[in-house]
Amino acid sequence: MRNFLLGATLMALLAFAIKYFIDQSNVQKTELQSSDLILDQIKNVGKLIVTEGHFAEVISYKDNKEFMSGLFTAKKTALVVVNAKVQIAYDLNAIEYTLDQETKTLAIHKIPKPNIEINPDIEYHTITADLFNQFVPKDHNTIRKKVTQHLKEKVKNSTLLTNSENRLISELQKLYILTNSLGWTLTYDDTSIQNRQMLQNLVF
């Protein structure tokens, strides 16, 4: 009888040990699967987001040169018509992050800034120039720089930038939805993300 109880106890302990190792193996397997799913989602998100738009502007260019201590001024002016194609791009392959399986945390450290590319088509109208202040190649470079800077300011205050930001947040939200569904935590700049609005506020 004593041997039977001892044997039963040993069998129970063995069964418990086997169940424990199986459970631990399943937990580790689940954690690895979760990590793989998150990494796959990061790869899917890691792409180039491009938003395109067009702008049309009329810009006045003036340049005055003074001679003889201001007694004589030579002027030149041009009316410039600009049609520009604008691209705003986020390269999400440049996202910097760490994945911590122990704390079940996906920490985003850096999100790339948008690259604004402006390709202006410039046409000159109503050009006037005095004899001592003629148009030279340097003027064309100055006008192009002025046009580009003017359009950058327009873009920053336009719906084009807002639309590109919304597309960025939509991609990042996929990471939030996945991590949240798997019981993980998504953080950005050491702050835990709880919802889309919080993500948008932190990113922008």
Image (spheres, rainbow, N blue to C red):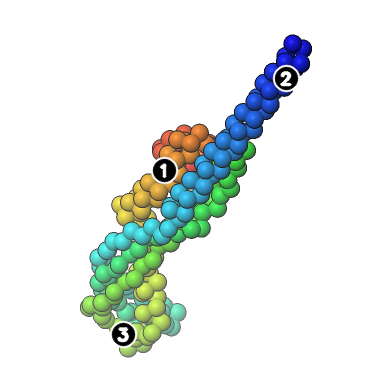
Please name which of the two marks, 1 or 2, marks the residue nearer to the observer: 2
Dot 2 alpha-carbon crowd within 10 angstroms: few under 14, some 14 to 19, many 20 or more: few
Q: CA distance from mark 1 to mark 2?
A: 56 Å
Q: Residue at x 58, y 48 (%)?
A: 98
Q: Secondary structure at mark 2?
A: helix
Farthest right residue? 2
Residue 83 at x, y percent in the picture: 26, 69
Lower position in the chain sequence, tag 1 or tag 2: 2
In the image, taking residue 5 as reference, residue 27 lies left or right, namely left
Q: Residue type at mark 1?
A: Gln
Q: CA distance from mark 3 to mark 2?
A: 112 Å
- Identify the mark at residue 173; answer none if there is no mark: 1
Residue 47 at x, y percent in the picture: 42, 58
Residue 71 at x, y percent in the picture: 39, 80
Please name which of the two marks, 1 or 3, marks the residue nearer to the observer: 1
Of the pair 137 and 159, the residue shown nearer to us: 159
Q: CA distance from mark 1 to mark 3?
A: 59 Å
Q: Is residue 185 above or below residue 86?
A: above
Q: Secondary structure at mark 3?
A: loop
Farthest top residue? 1
Please name which of the two marks, 3 or 2, marks the residue nearer to the observer: 2
Q: Which residue is mark 3?
A: 130
Farthest front residue? 1
Choose top left, top right, bottom left or bottom right for residue 124: bottom left
Residue 158 at x, y percent in the picture: 32, 54
Lower position in the chain sequence, tag 3 or tag 2: 2
Q: Which residue is mark 2?
A: 7
Q: Is residue 191 visible?
A: no
